[in-house]
Image (cartoon, grey):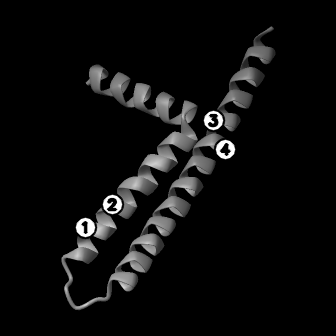
Amino acid sequence: MSDAKTQIESLRKWVVEHKLRTVGCLWLSGITGSIAYNWSRPNMKTSVKIIHARLHAQALTLGALAGAAVVEYYDHKSEEKAKAARDSRR
């Protein structure tokens, strides 16, 4: 159990350090998946397929940016609490 916790913690640390890379990879995977899904629907024009893929990827990216903002906010809050706790012990 502790091994899984350290893996999750190391993944979280990497995501915090590489926020833009994470969001970019998420956008790329979102647009790739959406294009693959839309290409399986033959009754749509190609331009509509591309527009739908862009919209899906854009929504996914906005969600990822909001998630990154929440992570940054809580990291900042936890650092402030840790600093306050250290200062109160002195």
Q: Residue at x 38, y 63 (%)?
A: 31
Q: Earlier in the sequence, mark 3 or mark 2?
A: 2
Secondary structure, mark 2, is helix
* Residue corresponding to mark 1: 36
Element marked by disc 4? helix
Using residue 8 as the reference point, say whether residue 58 is left or right of it.
right
Report which residue position mark 4 lands on.
Answer: 73
Crowd around label 2: few <14 · some 14–19 · many ≥20 (10 Å)? some
Between discs 4 and 2, the one toward the N terminus? 2
Select label 1 or label 4 by which is in front: 1
Q: Which residue is mark 3?
A: 75
Residue 2, image x, y percentages? 30, 21
Q: In this picture, is 6 found above or below 46?
A: above
Q: Which one is in front, 38 or 68?
A: 38
Q: Give the Cα distance between marks 3 and 1.
A: 36 Å
Q: Amino acid at mark 1?
A: Ala
For image coordinates 69% across by 35% down, the residue present is 76
The numbered disc on residue 52 is none
Q: Position of residue 78 (x, y in %)?
A: 65, 32
Which image quarter: residue 54?
bottom left
Q: Which mark is residue 32?
A: 2
Residue at horizontal 51 percent and vertical 49 percent from the top = 23
- Classify 10 Å Cα crowding around label 1: few (below 14), some (14-19), many (20 and above): few
